[in-house]
């Protein structure tokens, strides 16, 4: 169950859709295991770089998650939300925070069946992301042909899937692409201003709408190419965090979220998310730590919560001064 009611005290500026389809997991889902999974070592990450990660999972091949009925309903919802599309430095047309507006999107993004399905694939127990703007993000193709949907980047969160809502084979272009390398390697390429070698790029087009690619978003460098024909290219990105927030340290690029979200949303959601992580640490201290003479044991427990709060406060204080979007260009 999601740790709070997304609809309660929702932010201003996110009107609810008046009429929309109803999500029915029994009809709308079609969960089929991916044929292939790659890990971060295969991308060139060293043991040292992977030391503190909870999973070495990198990305899956396209895997079916929605049935024909499900994809038809989701398409209807994303079209109802399209008038609310905004742009950021990286993405020309997107809707974030749709879970505040659409019950279908909320129910779909929080689906327990999908969460369990991807937990098995990544070998890590997941839960839907506790920052609502990281749920059900929608990318629409730019209105001008040839402009990329999203530049080369890593994500502002650890885990997410990219779901094709429209048929990728009905348009020319619009591929989802990975860089077969590490973040350090792309940083060097970008700093030199040279092109990424084509043998280092994997270009993917799923066979049909309803297929998703799950990825370790903050470790795998990726982009979404623009379409060069008429037609539509719409994808939905849904985010996750580890269920055990104590054992699995959080990664949130608050600076990027602060630049992207409306000003009354970014900090509020990040503060709430931080409070949830801190609460998990305190719950552990209250419920799971044994009575002991060892004072250090309790200092360590309380300090872990204190550090989480202090770090978040530092980020919030600093962000207004020098916030800058980070990506690796087109
Ligand atoms: Fe991404």
Image (cartoon, rainbow, N blue to C red):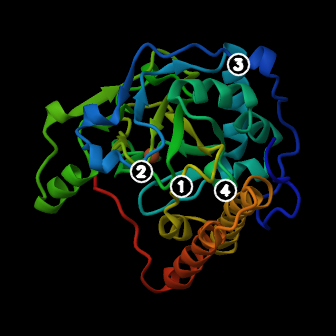
**Residue labelled with disc 2:** 52
Label 4 CA crowd tier, 10 Å (few <14, some 14–19, many 20+): many
Height in image: 286 above or below 238? below
Q: Position of residue 263 (x, y in %)?
A: 64, 74
Relative to 160, 46 lies left or right: left
**Residue labelled with disc 1:** 249
The answer to whether mark 1 and mark 2 are in CB contact below 8 A is yes
Whether residue 89 is visible to the viewer of this picture, yes or no, is yes
- Give the Cα separation between the discs numbered 2 and 3: 34 Å
Image point (64%, 66%), residue name? 301
- Give the Cα separation between the discs numbered 1 and 2: 8 Å
Query: Viewer-proximal residue, 330 or 113?
Result: 113
Q: Nearer the viewer, mark 2 or mark 3?
A: 2
The answer to whether mark 1 and mark 4 are in CB contact below 8 A is no
**Residue labelled with disc 4:** 131
Q: Nearer the viewer, mark 3 or mark 1?
A: 1
Label located before the other in sequence (3 or 1): 3
Label located before the other in sequence (4 or 3): 3
Query: Viewer-proximal residue, 42 or 291?
Result: 291
- Label 3 sits on a secondary structure element that is loop
Give the image quarter of residue 293. bottom right
Whether residue 228 is visible to the viewer of this picture, yes or no, is no
């Amino acid at each position: 169950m999601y740790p709070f009611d997304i609809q309660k005290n929702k932010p201003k500026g996110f009107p609810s859709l008046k009429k929309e389809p109803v999500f029915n997991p029994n009809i709308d889902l079609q969960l089929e295991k991916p044929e292939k999974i790659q890990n971060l070592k295969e991308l060139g990450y060293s043991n040292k770089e992977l030391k503190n990660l909870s999973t070495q999972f990198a990305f899956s091949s396209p895997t079916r998650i929605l049935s024909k009925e499900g994809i038809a309903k989701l398409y209807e919802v994303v079209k109802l939300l399209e008038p609310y599309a905004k742009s950021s430095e990286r993405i020309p047309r997107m809707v974030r925070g749709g879970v505040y507006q659409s019950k279908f999107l909320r129910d779909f993004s929080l689906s327990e069946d999908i969460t369990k399905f991807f937990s098995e694939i990544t070998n890590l127990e997941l839960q839907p992301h506790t920052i609502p703007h990281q749920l059900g993000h929608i990318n629409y193709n730019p209105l001008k042909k040839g402009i990329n949907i999203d530049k080369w980047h890593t994500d502002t969160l650890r885990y997410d899937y990219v779901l094709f809502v429209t048929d990728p084979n009905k348009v020319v272009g619009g591929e989802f692409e990975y860089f077969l390398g590490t973040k350090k390697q792309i940083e060097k390429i970008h700093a030199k201003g040279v092109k990424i070698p084509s043998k280092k790029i994997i270009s993917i087009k799923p066979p049909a709408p309803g297929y998703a690619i799950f990825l370790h978003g903050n470790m795998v460098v990726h982009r979404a190419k623009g379409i060069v024909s008429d037609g539509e290219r719409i994808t939905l990105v849904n985010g996750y965090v580890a269920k055990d927030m104590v054992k699995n340290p959080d990664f949130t690029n608050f600076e990027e979220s602060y630049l992207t979200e409306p000003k009354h949303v970014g900090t509020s959601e990040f503060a709430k998310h931080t409070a949830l992580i801190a609460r998990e640490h305190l719950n552990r201290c209250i419920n799971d730590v044994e009575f002991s003479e060892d004072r250090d044991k309790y200092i360590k427990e309380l300090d872990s919560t204190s550090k989480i709060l202090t770090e978040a406060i530092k980020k919030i204080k600093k962000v207004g001064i020098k916030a800058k979007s980070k990506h690796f260009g087109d």
